[in-house]
Amino acid sequence: MIPDDTIAAIATPLGEGGLAVLRLSGANAFAIADKCFQPVGKSSLLPSAAPTHTIQFGKIVRDGKVIDEVLLAVLRAPRTFTREDSVEISCHGGLLPAKLVLDTLLTHGARLAEPGEFTKRAFLNGRIDLAQAEAVADLIHSRTELALAAANEQLAGKLSQRINRLRDDLMLTLAHVEAHIDFPDEDISPDTKDQLLQRLETGIAFMDELLRTANEGQLLRRGIRAAIIGRPNAGKSSLLNQLLGRDRAIVSPIAGTTRDTIEEMANLRGLPVIFIDTAGLREARDEIELEGIRRSRTSLASAEFILHVLDASEPLTSADENYLTEFADKKRILVRNKTDLPVKLELPAAFNLQPSTFNLDVSCVSGQGIEALKDAIKNLIWAGEIKAEMLQVAINSRHQDALNRARASARLATDALRADATLELVAMDLRIAANAVGEIVGKTTTEDLLDSIFSAFCIGK
């Protein structure tokens, strides 16, 4: 159901700044703004009298008192983000000015927007589809240029175009099958059957192609977690600082300096990698260190891969061997640190096997080997070149779920058609597949699905 009330919200982050922006959208946007806005100067107009896409200078007034000097943008439907009459007000930054302007709008008839409601209205009014709406959130939360590029490609409709073609092909096949159900005296000719099967196989192959992008899509959106482990004083915190390019963790020759896990995101070759500096794994000497080691173990369990830091200036210890064996099933990179000192560490051949993808030498003092380590991390989590066409169709977990359901039903329909099963069963599976694909762009949705998607947005977007 398309709402007919008028909503308002602060669209910029709370806090002190040069400017704050408020959004007002709905049928009564101009009437509400007229009650609050006092034009200043001969050329400024009330919002209801101003041409679309113009900026008016004036003051927000409440109970005869001036709240703030503002610039007010008048945006008339349908050429707006929501396809509704809209007003955007730029006031001075800071908690109080923006809050008082918002309170004034609410006092004169606006309703406080729910999280993501402006984008939801853009979807309900047909300006964007559901995949594009999700791209708005991805755009806001982008942490690297590659993530930003992927969000922009999805917002531009590159994924939606392909999904719509897939759904159209499924619907066309369904129409052919239902036509034969309506006229049971006419059997499907072999040529027609082959064409239908070929169209279905092509659609399944395309779904497989999209599903192969799921890992990359989720990596770009949420990043990948990498735990840095090793004996105390092997140089884990120094390595974290080198990878981040700044001093984030305390570095000390005293073993056990890190007593808690430290998490920081780094933009590594365009990919968001969340590095977790863990407390040195050893027998704890007090309760605080024990808690730090417990947290390290928890972080290790959730990490997609590990950087195992070894001290190259000392021979391999039994503790090193224990950790090499304990985490043998983890995807990992073995990092020999302190190679600026005389090297005494040799790794036995037994530990130089998969899943240890790389063994690298670095010096956190000189920085030697750090760039090679970054390349190794990138190749470990994203093999091959990152191409623009990959970014166009990098799907998220919701798309993955819908495509998996669609693929399963399309495969059932294909097998049933090939086996000359009852056409009603073929049609039922095709309809399920088409509906699942339609969920991605919002052609088949439920209110619960929309609430789930837009509740993750910030208020004002």
Image (spheres, rainbow, N blue to C red):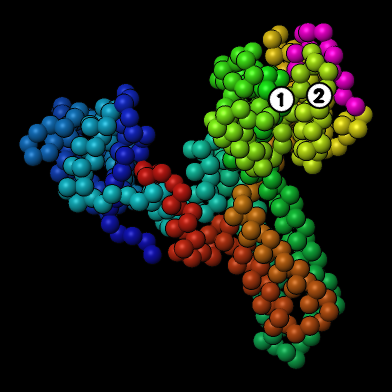
Q: Residue 329: horizontal and vertical position, in percent?
A: 79, 42
The earlier-in-sequence mark between 1 and 2 is 1
Q: Position of residue 58 (x, y in %)?
A: 19, 30
Q: Main secondary structure of the magenta part?
A: loop
Report the residue at 68% width, 29% height from top. 282
Q: Secondary structure at mark 2?
A: loop
Residue 412 in the image: above or below residue 35: below
Q: Quadrant of the C terminus?
A: top left
The image quarter in which residue 429 lies: bottom right
Residue 51 on the magenta segment: no
Task: Check disc 1 and report the residue beneath it.
Answer: 231
Q: Residue furthest front?
A: 285
Where does residue 123 sit, x and y in percent of width and height? 45, 54
Residue 392 in view, yes or no: no
Label ID, residue 317: 2
Are the residues flagged by discs 1 and 2 in contact, CB closer than 8 Å? Answer: yes
